[in-house]
Image (cartoon, rainbow, N blue to C red):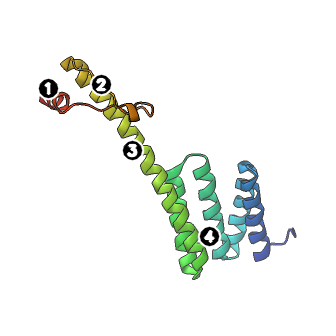
Amino acid sequence: MSPEPTQQRARALCVAAWLAILQGDLASAAGRLNQAEILGRRLDDEKAVGYVALFSGIIEALQGHLKQAVSLYEETIAHYQAVHEPIGIAMARLRKRVAEWETEKDVLRKAAVYFAQEMGRCLTATGSSPPTVPSMASSGYVACSRWSARACLRQ
């Protein structure tokens, strides 16, 4: 790569960052994205800055920082809309939605754990034990009778 500050260098740094992401070298990818962002902003290269946001979002998502990833994908969409880059917009929207789904799944997992804890507390307080459903028992689900749930709600 030529060290000259050109659009091609900014975009090549983005490609190098993408390859580093694919190889699992997130630290190297982040360093290259930092260089690409500085260069892209200096050259007013919205496409390069958009790629920086997109790939930075991917790094955040891979590290489990889904809210930051969603924010970066939104930034990517804004950059690509400014330069009428439909493929970039589509890629960012797809990645954003996947990160949102992952966030929702995490919330649902937490809600399921909380519900199970509360039902266990209620059933213990009422002296009931929930019947297990054989087909669901292996996956950790427990079915409760209506009586147990109503007794729990009265407390």
Query: What is the C-alpha distance between the residues marked 4 and 2?
Result: 49 Å
Residue at numbered disc 3: 108
Q: 136 left or right of 43?
A: left
The residue drawn where x is 26% and y is 31% is 144
Which numbered circle lies on residue 120? 2
The residue drawn where x is 42% and y is 50% is 104
The residue drawn where x is 19% and y is 27% is 148
Q: 43 left or right of 154?
A: right
Badge 3: residue crowd in 10 Å (few <14, some 14–19, many ≥20): few
Residue at numbered disc 4: 50
What SS does tag 3 mark?
A: helix
Closest to the observer: 150 or 100? 150
Badge 4: residue crowd in 10 Å (few <14, some 14–19, many ≥20): many
Please indicate, yes or no, whether residue 6 appears anywhere in the rendered image. Answer: no
Query: What is the C-alpha distance between the residues marked 1 and 2?
Result: 14 Å
What SS does tag 2 mark?
A: helix
- In the rendering, at what x and y percent does residue 90 appear? 55, 72
Query: What is the C-alpha distance between the residues marked 3 and 2?
Result: 18 Å
Three-letter amino acid code at the position of disc 1: Gln
Disc 4, disc 3: CB below 8 Å? no
Query: What is the C-alpha distance between the residues marked 4 and 3?
Result: 31 Å
Specify the quadrant of the image occupied by residue 6.
Answer: bottom right
Q: Is residue 15 above or below residue 107?
A: below
Three-letter amino acid code at the position of disc 4: Gly
Disc 1, disc 4: CB below 8 Å? no
Residue at numbered disc 1: 155
Disc 3, disc 2: CB below 8 Å? no
